[in-house]
Amino acid sequence: MGADIEAKLPSDSSMSWDELPLVKKLNWTHTIFVVFTPLISLYGIWTTPIQKPTLIWSVIYYFVTGLGITGGYHRLWAHKAYSATVPLQIILALAGGGAVQGSIKWWARGHRAHHRHTDTEKDPYSAHKGLFYSHIGWIMMNPEPGKIGYADTSDLNSDPIVRFQHKYFLLIALIMGFIFPVVIAGVGWGDWRGGFYFAAVARLVFVHHATFCVNSLAHYLGEHSFDDKHTPRDHFVTAFVTLGEGYHNFHHQFPQDYRNAIRFYQYDPTKWFIHTCSLFGLSYNLKRFPQNEITKGQLQMQEKKIEAAKKTLRWGEPLDQLPVYTVKEVEKICHEENRKWIIINNVVHDVSSFIDDHPGGKALISSAIGKDGTVAFTGGVYDHSNGAKNLVTTMRVGVIKPVQEDSFS
């Protein structure tokens, strides 16, 4: 996998892209590969007893090749979130090749376009095109000519390791994706068959779909922790299946940060790997976005959630929509119409439904009918709770006319 991300219309076709039949839009190399590798692995699992050393090796190599993508292709080359020594770069380039997801150059170019054009027509794997498309459909389909957004790859073009890996990618993918894991199991403990079906093919299928979940599941499952303009979300489940890439809302807001998870308890083995390498001098210049800006994003999203929650509650009629009374008018209405109105902070409240439930007794609240009970309510008799203060807002029926206007009445 990993042909040029741009596509061209078939030379013998006078049709537009939309008019082309599906069979001509499919990338048959990619489609055959992603369809048949799961089938081969299922056959192997069904017919081949798994040996414990092979199982352990398969899991280890899953993490090795997975980190080649998340720690290498993604955070090192696509985002320059940290720097790595040449030995570590070579290891990551080989490990990433073992994941068989295209070359560094091809992968990073598409991913940079995804970040620059998230959720638009120029996004190579836009979540707006559906879960299946963003997960695997985009790999099976050739991109529409001219639709993939521009992304600068001049730094990758000048990188000798990236150029070498791109030039010899098919050979590297064959060796690291299939031959190497089989040889380790075969030479190590004589399990050639298990090495092929488990450490090579089944492991590859798991690595593929773990990475694909970053483009699909991470845009559907979880919370908008830092921004809700676009689809990326944060969720532990996605982080677990993607080697820590599931805190995706954070990542899209702060892509140059070498971390995806910022809490010590959040699952991000890629971050731990990069940090551990730094202890041995293999990685350096680990970038972190300023905490002040990260906290701003968190608070802004919390404010949005609070405002949305407040809209579901009853806060009483807005003051500017209430009728205006004088104090004398309130007294008169209460006397002549037997209204149970009390004035608190220049707002008239109808307490008729609450008189019998008043904790201080019916007599006490009745004594304030038609009067200004502000002093008693705010501490003169009893400093009422926040719950009581919120409750009276739902009882608003009017506001008191300012005193200077009263003098002309």
Image (cartoon, grey):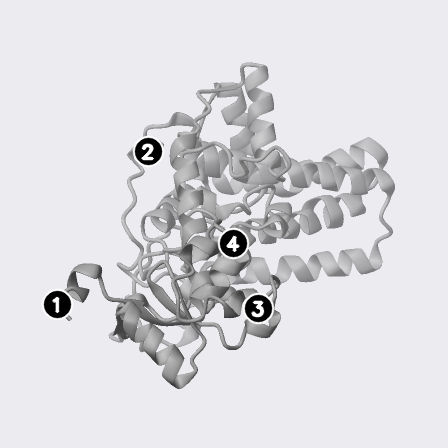
Residue 89 in the image: above or below residue 362: above
In the picture of the structure, the residue carrying the numbered disc 2 is 157
Position of 318 relative to 58 (above/below):
below
- In primary-sequence order, the first of circles 2 and 1 is 2
Q: Position of residue 139 (x, y in %)?
A: 47, 58
- Is residue 327 at least partly visible in the picture? yes
Q: Earlier in the sequence, mark 2 or mark 3?
A: 2
Element under label 3? helix
Q: Nearer the viewer, residue 389 or 373?
A: 373
Estimate the x, y position of residue 80 in percent, counting from the top left.
Answer: 40, 31
Q: Look at the numbered discs 2 and 1 and tell me whether their residues touch, using CB distance below 8 Å.
A: no
Q: What residue is shown with label 3?
A: 363
Of callouts 1 and 3, which one flags the residue occurring earlier in the amino acid sequence? 3
For badge 3, the amino acid type reads: Ala
Q: Which residue is outermost to the bottom?
A: 337
Could you tell me residue 385's position as x and y percent?
54, 53
Q: How many numbered marks have been drawn onto this rendered protein structure?
A: 4
In 3D space, how far apart are the residues under numbered discs 4 and 3 (Cα atoms)?
22 Å
Query: Label 4: few (<14), some or many (≥20) within 10 Å?
Result: few
- Secondary structure of the residue carrying numbered label 2: helix
Q: Amino acid at mark 2?
A: Asn
Nearer to us: label 2 or label 1: 1
Q: Nearer the observer, disc 2 or disc 3?
A: 3
- Percent position of residue 216, x then y: 51, 58
Label at residue 408: 1
Residue type beneath disc 4: Asn
The secondary structure type at the circle numbered 1 is loop
Residue at 45% x, 50% y: name it. 302
Q: In front: mark 4 or mark 1?
A: 1
Horizontal side, residue 287 vs residue 136: left or right: left
| As drawn, 289 above or below 319 | above
